[in-house]
């Protein structure tokens, strides 16, 4: 199973400006800490947003039965994205016997893109 998503950074900027709780509502505590450490947070916020939608496409459901907040896109020590699932998103992965989701992110000043694949349980 694979999933891809691309977002316009300007659109995310407008969503943040329009709704002061946009970040709090849609991103985990760990993601918010990560954004604070970034020189250009808007690009990483947009990439993480694309990442969440790409993961929802891996499930084949879109954002249904769980919240964006249930998909936390974190980084390892070298900066590689790590997908951590909670609540409805974790249940969806378990139902489909998805062991983990691998994710790749990229961004320019205008767009962010995410590509995700599911790794299934072997037993
Ligand atoms: C599926 C979803 C993530 C698509 O994201 P988007 O930013 O709206 O649109 P994108 O251009 O990135 O993707 C559209 C493509 O996703 C694919 N897609 C649609 N539903 C999908 C699903 N359930 N699983 C995987 N891929 C899906 C299709 O190929 C679609 O292209 P098409 O319309 O030409 O067939 C999103 O619409 C969603 O979560 N929908 C379900 C819940 C919903 O409607 N919520 C309201 C908004 S939160």
Image: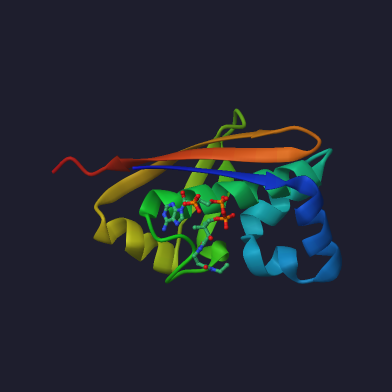
Q: Nearer the viewer, residue 77 or 24?
A: 24
The coloring applied to the image is rainbow
Looking at the image, residue 113 sits to the left or right of residue 102; the answer is right
How many numbered marks appear? 0
Q: Position of residue 96 (x, y in %)?
A: 26, 55
In the rendered image, residue 104, in percent from the top left (x then y), is placed at 54, 34
Residue 76 screen position, x and y as percent:
56, 36
User: Which percent across, then down, holds residue 79?
Assistant: 62, 32
**Would you place residue 31 above or below residue 17 in this image?**
above
The part of the image, by quadrant, that contains residue 29 is bottom right
Residue found 26% across the figure and 61% down from its top:
95
Q: Residue furthest top?
A: 78
- Residue drawn at x 26%, y 43% is 120
Residue at (81% x, 50% y) in the render: 10
The image quarter containing residue 30 is bottom right
Measuring 40% from the left and 48% from the top, which residue is drawn there? 58
For residue 21, side relative to residue 75 (left or right) = right
Q: Give the camera-side residue of 34 and 26.
A: 26
From the image, which quarter does the N terminus lie in?
top left
Quarter that holds the C terminus: top left
- Looking at this view, name the residue that lies furthest to the left: 123
Q: Is residue 60 left or right of residue 77?
A: left
């Amino acid at each position: 199973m694979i999933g891809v998503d691309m977002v316009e950074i300007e659109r995310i900027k407008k969503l943040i400006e329009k709704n002061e709780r946009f970040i709090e509502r849609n991103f985990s505590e760990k993601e918010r800490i990560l954004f604070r450490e970034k020189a250009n947070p808007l690009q990483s916020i947009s990439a993480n947003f694309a990442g969440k939608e790409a993961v929802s496409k891996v499930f084949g459901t879109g954002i249904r039965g769980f919240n964006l907040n249930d998909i936390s896109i974190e980084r390892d020590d070298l900066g590689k994205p790590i997908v951590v699932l909670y609540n409805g998103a974790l249940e969806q992965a378990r139902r489909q016997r998805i062991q983990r989701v691998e994710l790749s992110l990229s961004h320019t000043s205008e767009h962010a893109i995410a590509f995700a694949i599911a790794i299934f349980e072997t037993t």
